[in-house]
């Protein structure tokens, strides 16, 4: 299992946080998703078949691209 934290500058409110949690948690292999508007970060714990690449691609697809 792996945990990563991404900076996501587009997080601005609770709705953004909710969208990220709902969408990313549906990705197979994702165990937990925590996001916060005040820090503009999301911390995601995952295992195979999820990968950092697939998580970042999904975040970009839902209009919350991650930067590091």
Image: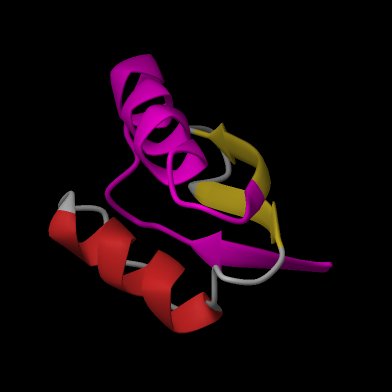
Q: Left or right: where does residue 15 sit relative to residue 44?
A: left
Q: Position of residue 56 (x, y in %)?
A: 38, 71
Q: Nearer the viewer, residue 43 or 68?
A: 43
State the image quarter where residue 45 is shown: bottom right
Q: Position of residue 16 (x, y in %)?
A: 31, 29
Residue at the farthest top position: 14
Q: Is residue 54 magenta?
A: no
Q: Position of residue 52 (x, y in %)?
A: 53, 78
Q: Nearer the viewer, residue 45 or 38?
A: 45
Using the image, determine if residue 68 lies above or below residue 48: below
Q: Quadrant of the N terminus?
A: bottom right
Query: How has the structure been colored for display?
Result: secondary structure
Q: Residue at x 54, y 68 (%)?
A: 50
Residue 29 appears in view: yes
Q: Left or right: where does residue 51 sit relative to residue 12?
A: right
Q: Nearer the viewer, residue 45 or 66?
A: 45
Q: Residue at x 18, y 49 (%)?
A: 62
Residue at the farthest right position: 1
Q: Residue at x 31, y 58 (%)?
A: 59
Q: Which residues are magenta?
A: 1-30
State the image quarter where residue 6 is shown: bottom right
Q: Left or right: where does residue 14 sit relative to residue 40?
A: left
Residue 68 appears in view: no
Using the image, determine if residue 29 lies above or below residue 14: below
């Amino acid at each position: 299992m792996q945990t990563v934290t991404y900076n996501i500058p587009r997080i601005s409110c609770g709705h953004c946080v909710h969208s990220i949690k709902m969408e990313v948690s549906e990705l197979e292999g994702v165990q937990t998703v925590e996001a916060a508007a005040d820090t503009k970060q999301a911390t995601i714990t995952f295992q195979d078949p999820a990968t950092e690449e697939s998580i970042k691609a999904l975040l970009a697809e839902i209009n919350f691209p991650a930067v590091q």
